[in-house]
Amino acid sequence: MIRLPKFRYALPLAGSIALAAAFPLVAQQSVSLPGQVDLSRVEAGTYATDPGHTLVGWRVNHFGFNDYFGIFGSIEGTLQLDPANPEAAKLDVTIPINEVALASAGLKEHLLRPGKDGKAPDFFGPDPDTARFVSTSVTRTGETKAMIVGDLTMNGVTRPVAIAAEFTGAGANPMSKAKTIGFEGRAVLNRSDFGLATFVPVVSDQVELEISAAFEKK
């Protein structure tokens, strides 16, 4: 096992006093965040995604060297939720594939380019259909956690996908004043199931999804 060296740094007396004085302020700022993990703040009703603050990140392994990742944004949809009966919740969201954000402009072009010489595209092609996830069941797995199973339609193929979701906060958005709830989720799928098998297995078939979603009450 490699152990990293421990660095020690002694603050001057004045710095130590200033740091100690700042701790109550930091704690106060943390407590006063508009969103809190407090189920009593969640109201029953229909919520719409906040597209500017709802993201789906994806990650694949590249040639066995390292992972590469990107993000889908501008996600729209609705969540019907009653905190008294969370297992009756309904989720329906759409994900514009052409809104993918990548560090490499060349890779984005590859994901969305037409096939060469009239052949099928390697991935989505220049005019990809919007992906859609529609929940079919919600099972509570903890006080703030649930397993959401639904149908994901992507690249013209529909397959079941399970999302391990966790409630991360509720409150009033200080900018829009909208009552907002937040969730994080994780899922795994095989891209070949959706007709996206180019470069498998040197680029992993398995895709890890990480979801961060905000919903505003209508």
Image (spheres, rainbow, N blue to C red):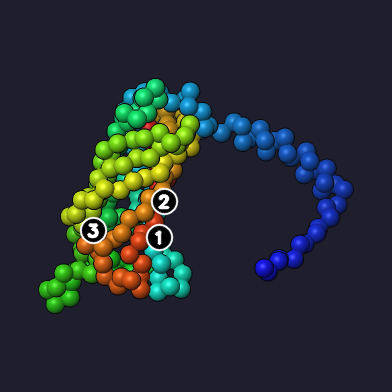
Q: Which type of secondary structure does the marked residue at label 3 adopt? A: helix
**Residue 159, percent from left and from top:** 23, 51
The picture places residue 18, in percent across and down from the top left corner, at 79, 43
Q: Mark 2 highlights which residue?
A: 210
* Front one among 67 and 70: 67
- Can you identify the residue that label 1 sits on? 59
Residue 194, which numbered label? 3
Separation of residues labelled 1 and 2 (CA atoms): 8 Å
Residue contact between numbered discs 1 and 2, judged by CB atoms under 8 Å: yes
Residues tagged 3 and 1 counted as in contact (Cβ below 8 A): no
User: For the residues marked 2 and 3, what is the alpha-carbon distance in whole angstroms?
Assistant: 18 Å
Q: Residue at x 37, y 28 (%)?
A: 86
Residue 53 seen anywhere in this rendered image of the structure: no
Q: Amino acid at mark 3?
A: Phe
Bin the neighbour count of mark 2 within 10 Å (Cα to Cα): few under 14, some 14-19, many 20 and up: some
Q: Nearer the viewer, residue 210 or 106?
A: 210
Residue 14 x/y as whole percent: 85, 47
User: In this view of the protein, can residue 37 be seen by the observer?
Assistant: yes
The label nearer to you, 3 versus 1, is: 3
- Position of 154 compared to 165: left or right? left
Residue at image position (40%, 60%) is 59
Q: Is residue 204 above or below residue 94?
A: below
